[in-house]
Image (cartoon, rainbow, N blue to C red):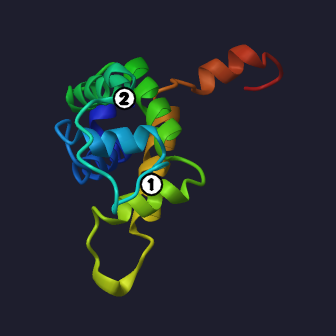
Amino acid sequence: MNLSESSDRTRLIQLLAMLPGRDDVEFWNQVGRAGAGYDPETSSEDATPDLDGYVLDKMQSGVDQLLEAPGNQGDIALFCHYLLGWFDGERPLLWKYLNRYFLVGDYTDAAGERICRELSDAAWRLYFTCQNGDSNTLREQWPGHHS
C-alpha cells in the first residue's frame, strides 16, 4: 500500500496538527507524564523538556517521517508505537489536562479523552499498515493445501 494515500496517515496528520507544536514544552512534558502532577492553580511555565527532550525528539523525528512522502514505513511504525505509548489506554489525568486545549464549551468534558482515542485508533491502524503483512507472507508461514 502507498502510505502517502493512507486515510489513517491523513487522519493522524490532522489530529496531530490540532495539538500544540514543539515550542509548547509544558504540553509535551505533560503528555510524557500522562498528565500526572499537573495543577493549574500551582503550575508555572514548564520550560525545560523532561528526559533531555525525549518526547520532543521522538515527536520531531516522527512528524518528519509522517510528512515526508512516502516516508519510511519502519520509522512511521515506530512513531505510531510511541504515540500509542503516550496516548492510548486509560489516562484520565492526561484527558483532563488536554480538555484545556479543545474548547467545545459546556457541551462535553470528554474532549481530551476523545482526542486521545481518535489519535490512538489512527496510530494503531497505521502501525499495522506499515508491517507489510500480505497473503504471500501468510502462505510462506502456512505452507499447505491452498490454491
Mark 2 neighbour class, 10 Å CA radius: few under 14, some 14 to 19, many 20 or more: some
For the view shown, which residue lies furthest in the bottom direction? 106
Whether residue 124 sits left or right of residue 12 in the image: it is right
Q: With respect to residue 125, does 70 lie above or below?
A: above
Counting from the top left corner in percent of width and height, residue 26 is at: 28, 43
Determine whether the residue tagged by mark 2 lies in a helix, strand or loop.
Answer: helix
Counting from the top left corner in percent of width and height, residue 98 is at: 37, 59
Q: What distance separates the C-alpha of mark 2 from that of mark 1?
A: 21 Å
Question: Which one is in front in this view, the residue at disc 2 or the one at disc 1?
Answer: 2
For the view shown, which residue lies furthest in the front direction? 42
Q: Amino acid at mark 2?
A: Asp
Q: Amino acid at mark 1?
A: Cys
Q: Which numbered dot is residue 50?
A: 2
Counting from the top left corner in percent of width and height, residue 48 is at: 26, 30
**Residue at image mark 1:** 116
The answer to the question of whether label 2 and label 1 lie on touching residues, with beta carbons closer than 8 A, is no
Q: What is the quadrant of the N terminus in the image?
A: top left
Q: With respect to residue 80, does 139 lie above or below?
A: above
